[in-house]
Amino acid sequence: MDAGLFSALFARGDVDAGDDAWLQAMLDAEAALARAVERAGLAPPGSGEAVTAVARSEIFDNRTLGEDAAATGNPVPALVRALTKLLADSEFAGAVHMGATSQDIIDTAAMLLARRAIDVILADLSAAAASCGARATEHARTVMSGRTLLQQAVPVTFGLVAAGWLTAVDEARLDLHRIRSTRLAVQFGGAAGTLASFGEAGPQVTALLGEELGLSVPVLPWHADRRRVVDLAATLAGTCAALSKIARDVTLLAQTEVAEVTSGRGGSSAMPHKQNPVAAVIILGCTKQAPGLLATLAAAAEQEHQRAAGAWHSEWQPLTHLLTLTASAASWSTDMLESLEIDPSRMRANLEATHGLPLAEHIASVLAPAIGPQAAHDLVAQASLQATSDKISLADALLSDETSAKALADAGINATLLHSHLEPESYLGATSEFIERALAASAVTEQALKG
Amino acid sequence: MDAGLFSALFARGDVDAGDDAWLQAMLDAEAALARAVERAGLAPPGSGEAVTAVARSEIFDNRTLGEDAAATGNPVPALVRALTKLLADSEFAGAVHMGATSQDIIDTAAMLLARRAIDVILADLSAAAASCGARATEHARTVMSGRTLLQQAVPVTFGLVAAGWLTAVDEARLDLHRIRSTRLAVQFGGAAGTLASFGEAGPQVTALLGEELGLSVPVLPWHADRRRVVDLAATLAGTCAALSKIARDVTLLAQTEVAEVTSGRGGSSAMPHKQNPVAAVIILGCTKQAPGLLATLAAAAEQEHQRAAGAWHSEWQPLTHLLTLTASAASWSTDMLESLEIDPSRMRANLEATHGLPLAEHIASVLAPAIGPQAAHDLVAQASLQATSDKISLADALLSDETSAKALADAGINATLLHSHLEPESYLGATSEFIERALAASAVTEQALKG
Amino acid sequence: MDAGLFSALFARGDVDAGDDAWLQAMLDAEAALARAVERAGLAPPGSGEAVTAVARSEIFDNRTLGEDAAATGNPVPALVRALTKLLADSEFAGAVHMGATSQDIIDTAAMLLARRAIDVILADLSAAAASCGARATEHARTVMSGRTLLQQAVPVTFGLVAAGWLTAVDEARLDLHRIRSTRLAVQFGGAAGTLASFGEAGPQVTALLGEELGLSVPVLPWHADRRRVVDLAATLAGTCAALSKIARDVTLLAQTEVAEVTSGRGGSSAMPHKQNPVAAVIILGCTKQAPGLLATLAAAAEQEHQRAAGAWHSEWQPLTHLLTLTASAASWSTDMLESLEIDPSRMRANLEATHGLPLAEHIASVLAPAIGPQAAHDLVAQASLQATSDKISLADALLSDETSAKALADAGINATLLHSHLEPESYLGATSEFIERALAASAVTEQALKG
Amino acid sequence: MDAGLFSALFARGDVDAGDDAWLQAMLDAEAALARAVERAGLAPPGSGEAVTAVARSEIFDNRTLGEDAAATGNPVPALVRALTKLLADSEFAGAVHMGATSQDIIDTAAMLLARRAIDVILADLSAAAASCGARATEHARTVMSGRTLLQQAVPVTFGLVAAGWLTAVDEARLDLHRIRSTRLAVQFGGAAGTLASFGEAGPQVTALLGEELGLSVPVLPWHADRRRVVDLAATLAGTCAALSKIARDVTLLAQTEVAEVTSGRGGSSAMPHKQNPVAAVIILGCTKQAPGLLATLAAAAEQEHQRAAGAWHSEWQPLTHLLTLTASAASWSTDMLESLEIDPSRMRANLEATHGLPLAEHIASVLAPAIGPQAAHDLVAQASLQATSDKISLADALLSDETSAKALADAGINATLLHSHLEPESYLGATSEFIERALAASAVTEQALKG
């Protein structure tokens, strides 16, 4: 895409799905078709090479092709005319667009664009996963507050948070890989999906076309069965979903009042002191556009007969946009994660600021065997309220109340033991094991993606 | 927008919401601000003129501005720097961007783009309404089959169909006019919506800014209250809704087997005989993208504090796209409607092809007083089934069955009267009055839009 | 709606759009039609009263009607049969459903449900607006940090925040009122929108039907023009948008680390100390569902001919759901706002925690006249970085640096003046005026809604 | 779901995702948890059995649980209290909800509901696939018009159309199977995903819980990683996409003017003659709701920290609704396909009504070797226009024009050969092979689903 006012934000990454890229992908499809029909013996030797030689986007004019598209509803007929004209005096002209319809070229081109985009996205996600993995390892024991409904809950570690990000990114990568391997298929059906003009040779040409382009060969031409597009879009939106969660966490952890991480130092035109988490913000600016685009593509799958009147046409822009935005979000995510600075002391300070409340559940759990879980829950809830209103520690609230002091005594918990139960490190459960599992699963993922 | 491969399809119409248009709109906002602060006595005389003189998009480089946008998350800081630099040696530099924040410029620019787009859309819709009105008048008595659930129902006239289209377009026009007049407001709040750097002079500057730009002045800066954007988007999507219904009807009426209208003669790259309804198809290609974009913008309204981290940024592309697509659909609709050819004889032929079935309800209604509505309904339903299975006319089915023949006799309906009740013209109800009402309402609309 | 497992969350408020409410609304439409046809002289005197007398949902069985709906695709034909049967031995049976089609009844019933829902929503929003107004007044001078991109920006007051909420709620109220007054129209067109079975009397019956139900009379039957549904849905989604912003702010301000407000005290099944902002959370649980439902309804407007095959049917559930969710969000918002506790001292403490940084823009603005805006911005930005890294106050950073100390001196700002410029109260700009404007506008809104 | 006014339409099929089903699924999760903790040696022997014995929805009151849900934001805490109370006097009370948080129960219950729904959907789709397969076989050679952009294109056979439907249904089945096998995982993380209250025993309990419920065990608790929900929703929406295409085709083929199929015979309350394709219409009424619900669920994946404030809550209704609607569409599709009547003679008649035009491409293709593809295309296009305007056959248009007559002669095509090239059967290309491939692939699918 040409560099423009917003492209560094929303069209970042090495994906190009602009006009030139579309044009080249359509030309790649036409050239591959010419090679396929030559290989099938349906066009003179040299046809494939001849068409391939002129199938270069820079010798065509988007503007003219675009204007002519208005007459037919898509740019392919004009492109075919232009391509044929370049070979007008040769025996190879007949090999151009042989047996194809416009949809064959546009759908196949979309698959090629999707494949290139997925490759770029996978590369960026690999870097993002590596960052997450490194953080998960490094901060496996860096305690911080878990937070539910935006309230402090029980302790976690930042390593576990990063492990959660890692697992989401890894699953997104596997899903993109699945789609790339199994759902990106050549489209080739001719006028109405029968490849009629080839007689019985159609399937052979399709197979060769798939070979030329490295795309799957579908059971049937999929011109009117749009589930491939929906599957692709869903996987892109699922990737955005994974990245949106990470970016949301980063913006929240980077809040001035939380300050557990910093990520980037974006300035403000008005405020000299601002250090905005630009990467995280722009990731969200990208990912929040994905669900609407996915909905458009899912709705467009209700297509009439052998080629839809409008629904097909409504796919081109949202799919292009979704590929570009996902790639942009993935690219920004590598920046965000690599530049992420963690402040373990602030994490601990925030956790301790409420004087033991995040460990309330732990105290309840150690009281439960003595007085029953519901009573333990209620008693600690009462002490928590007391601690909050009197601005004292949970320990003091528990020890100063007669009932709870007795319960502690009954449970064999003296003040020293109580305070040790109030240490975050004492209440991390399976945190370490979960981190190890995420890292191990990621190694398997990495292997699977290489294989 | 630069002419490109798909722009004749999806960015048609005289709307430009590409990078250059965005840049110019931002510059227009900056220039108006400089004039406003000068008028408020906060900048040296001549500041407004000086800034306005350099606020021309062609002297800035989108590519550079765009690259710098990555550092701050939006292109305004770089633009402000470039603008300031152009006035660096003058006393006017201080008037640039005075008291503003990036969001003030981007939101105000979006309103300016929206206004220009609405003006273009309204012009196209005025032509579309005129076409519909002319068809409603001309074909007020051209009978055709009404169709419900894609099955022939009772007769209507093509004039009534066109009157329905007219009313929908008119209501869309009124709604666009409402939004243009009442919801497109200047955005001006400074860093966090207090206009703090102006002391108490902020509201005066806002008022002057509104005056300079011809935009409404809101009660409060609306930086974090995105209902204006949602309202605008909803009205655009509502316009698309009106046009989508017309285009859907045209594609259906133009089906080879129906052939009651033709609209355009788009060719096919594969099939020499095709005459595709390109305009209608591309309208649907545009309008089917609107609901997803509207959903994105409605979801984006959940914005944090004084400026959202991502949700705001996620608005720019869908809003631009929705303006462009709506304008494109409106532009195509004038083509579609002006080129629409009506075939009254085919309309009548289709209506008569089922030998009276579309008038079954009429017969039931004239039998009802004699035998009750339910019995009349059931008896005619039975005769309709008979007519279909025996491939005879409804009249023959009714007359040849003893029970129904008796019922007709009881109701005083002889064969002549029966046949006259089976004439489509005999069963048009309020069709004429409805057409007249639609035309009268349209005249009022036209007046209101001029006023 | 019957009380169920989730209805206290998502179907709160006094709106009932469950099966019984739908059934009663359909019966209300049928009864009004009987009264209208009687008044038009088309049915025997007493017909209206007779039909009205039996048009009570409790004497019908949803289950049976629902089962029969499978045969026809909607529940009206079975309802009409049941209603007719109740009057079978009377002369009034013929007045049931006279001239109507199923869509007339369902669409009109939907309008009745919408009106009832809007009335309930408006009552809740009136209470919400009152709460916001009271907070805006009470906390007009309660300084707190403005926050952009989730980073502290310049100071605002909580009163201004509440004024922003107020304006959004007020504009939502006005829009709901507009839709209620102008867009809720009776649907009456008969089989294909011609009211054919009435001959020329159709429009008179429509007018009387509108009168009976207190609904607008449209220019044309709107069976195939769904912009009214889209407009209604957009306004409901716009209301959700306004409420979502407030709830998002509340969840953020209530974060443990921010703690500037508390709202509700929801418990946790696991954690005894949790005090969750349940109302705000459930509001978001409701409002986040609105954009998708709006998209469905906007997409459904592409309807074929005189009645759509599926698109119409796809409206019933999303519209019902959107009415219910909006009402639920509005109801929860009154709770959330009334229970909201503000902590002014924490607000000030958070603002002061960064030792002057939120006032950086103020310092830049007072330096600008002496050294130019860009230099002032850059110099203060540098000092802000220094203050952050050295953990000193912005004042100290400015005074200890030679360049900035000189600039301050040049601008005539001594240490005392510098500190006074660093007081939040010194940099509130138009805050007071904005609050007053919001309150004044709200009074006008209140008046308009009463009128 | 209780039978209601609309449930035969939108909640058909054997799926129950109403309140009682949700309650039972939550109880199933609680009971399985009790059995798991007992097996892990963390609760007294008999605990699992005791909790399981009382975990029956019929002994709880949805209304009361629902009311209490308002205090905590979800119904689980009240359910846990009620469940504990039932075991209050026993040693087993402590085994209830041990180590769990509300989200563990709700998410796991959602997975159980999803699994049951998928099983029902797969059974219906198996029947639908069988119907499609039978039609593909039976009508492999039943020629009909292919239609692109709703215009007649080249011939296809109905068997090929049915084969296309089959492939789409089969791919939907495989995708549902994939999700069921790999993405429906137990959710178990405790308060913040660490299973802290179990010390190091958490993962063992999770494994046992997965075993008890037959659900996958995830790498990590997925409380804040919602890609499983998005994947599930995408697959359901993809299933709806496949069904929507079939239903759209059926409504179009069943149009009065096309009449190539009939499907169902739904009556009208107004029109005695109507035979509406109710099943196809209601399928579309269901499937058109899917994209908006999918968008809501994809957007909800942006979740904060360890449990989201609102986004999580916003999932419950759309997911329930999407499961129900997909199941309903699948159930209706078996009806639609089984009741589908094909009219081969009408198919041929429609194809022949335009006197050879659908074979225009064939003629161009046989002329191409002699005169080049572009010239052949243009010449046949000209003849097609002539044929249309003069209402003559394409053969006559070609033979009566000097240029084209010469071209035919040059290509060695005499009148007899021309007419044979105009036979639909002569231009079906790979139709037979495609049908065979679809049937073979379906057999493989069937096997894979059984395995």
Image (spheres, coloured by chain):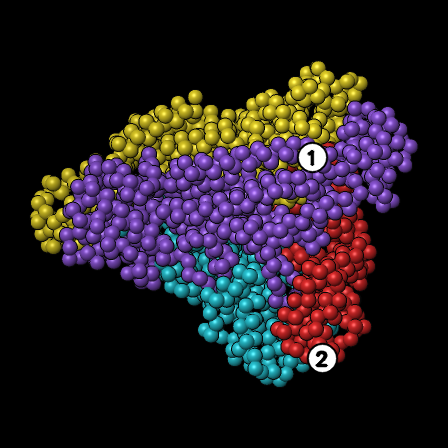
Chain colours: A cyan, B purple, C yellow, D red
Q: Which residue is mark 1?
A: B428
- Position of B233 with respect to C324 (left or right) is left
Q: Quadrant of the C terminus of chain B?
A: top left
Q: Quadrant of the N terminus of chain B?
A: bottom left
In the rendered image, the vertical position of residue B282 relative to residue A67, given as above or below: above
Q: Is residue D306 visible?
A: no
Instruction: Give the amino acid type for the residue marked by disc 1 in the picture.
Output: Leu
Of A331 and B97, the residue lying toward us? B97
Q: Which residue is mark 2?
A: D410
Image position, residue C226 (x, y; %): 57, 39
The subunit letter for the residue under badge 2 reads D
Per the model, the C-alpha gap separating discs 1 and 2 is: 57 Å
Q: Residue furthest bottom?
A: A45
Tell me the element at label 1. loop
The subunit letter for the residue under badge 1 reads B
In the rendered image, the vertical position of residue A107 relative to residue A241, given as above or below: below
Image position, residue B222 (x, y; %): 35, 39
Q: Residue at x 62, y 47 (%)?
A: B249
Q: Residues within 10 Å of mark 2 (few under 14, many from 20)?
A: few
Q: How many marks?
A: 2
Q: Residue at x 65, y 18 (%)?
A: C39
Of C404 and C373, the residue lying toward us? C373
State the mark number for residue B89: none
